[in-house]
Image: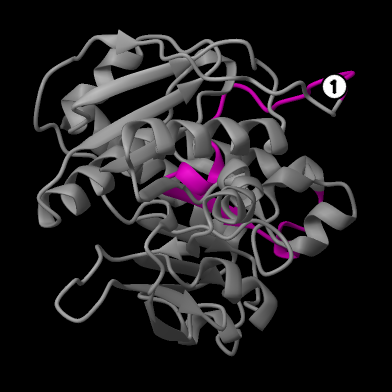
Amino acid sequence: MVLVYINSPEGKLKKSAFEAVTYGYKAAQSLDTEVVALTIGNTDNAGILGQYGAAKVLNIAGAENFDSGTYAAIIADAAQQVGANIVVMPDDSTGKALLGRVAVRMDAGAVSGVKTLPDTSAGFVVKKNVFSGKAIVDYNITSDRKVLSIAGNTFPPEVVGSDVAVETPSINVPASRVRIKEVSTVKGTVPLPEAELVVSAGRGVKDPDNWGIIEELANELGATTACSRPVADVGWRPHHEHVGQTGVAIRPNLYIAIGISGAIQHLAGVNQSKTIVVINKDPEAPFFKAADYGIVGDLFDVVPRLNDAIRKFKATS
């Protein structure tokens, strides 16, 4: 059996939830078994996970606020109850906090940021990127139990079934050792790890008052905005928009870098993007070496023209 843990912040299912269930379903098929989805706390419309392959959906109440210790205990207990020897979760901030704890409780081998389905022809082999995406490593998990977190934007959600009933099993919810005083979340935008389209800018924008053309481009494309570290460090943009080795690592379908030179620390967080477009007036900017498409020009000339072109295209299509 494969158990997929689903994070549902504020009771909402995110795209990463459907990606994880899709992965779990495909892995279960190759192992001739089924996938069970697990949500903790209030979760709206959890039965929809059946559309993505879950044969059963479990919901555990009584732990509304995230505590990695409490949640890990619940997940390990649920895995034991359903007889799951494989646990899958998204490789988001919650998954990163849970992976090791769940593995210890289950006496399991663990691999984070998996990008392939398991190859069981000679063991249980999965692949992940290492060295900031410069290499790919095969991991053969030899333990009886396995815990995996799935890299975002790697396995597109696929509808294969229909809604299922949500069950509430009897699982002990340990008392939390964490007292949460306040929760502050970013609202109204697609989180960067889940974004398929990202428009990012750096110091080439020159002044925070010039950020309007960047946001305009993002709005026209339906993209999420991001920035380089220097921009976040000086307070032009919030730190949750900082992408790179010391910020958020992303894997969008399209990454547009505007006025960013392309230092190695920045590239380490974005080089898994499927398509990279660079706009920079310096033809020697390192970012052009990593770009699929590049425009050498002043961003204050190029970006407004690009915005106009997109508006015209949308108006006629």
Give the residue at x 47% y 18%. Answer: 12
When asked about the image quadrant of residue 51, the answer is top left
In this view of the protein, can residue 304 be seen by the observer?
no
Mark 1 belongs to which amino acid?
Ile
Q: Tell me residue 30's x, y (percent).
A: 12, 57
Q: Tell me residue 94's x, y (percent).
A: 61, 41
When asked about the image quadrant of residue 205, the answer is bottom right
- Front-most of residues 313 and 76: 76
Give the residue at x 29% y 36%. Answer: 312
- Front-most of residues 272 and 277: 272
Q: Is residue 86 left or right of residue 215?
A: left
Q: Main secondary structure of the magenta part?
A: loop
Q: Is residue 296 left or right of residue 184?
A: left
Which residue range is magenta in the image?
179-207
Q: What residue sits right under mark 1 in the picture?
A: 180
Q: Is residue 59 left or right of residue 285?
A: left
- Front-most of residues 25 and 167: 167
The quarter in which the C terminus is drawn is: top left
Q: Is residue 111 left or right of residue 153?
A: right
Q: In what element is the residue under mark 1?
A: loop
In this view of the protein, can residue 303 be seen by the observer?
yes
When asked about the image quadrant of residue 247, the answer is bottom right
Total numbered labels placed on residues in the image: 1
Tell me if residue 57 is in the magenta stretch: no
Give the residue at x 36% y 52%. Answer: 153
The quarter in which the N terminus is drawn is: top left
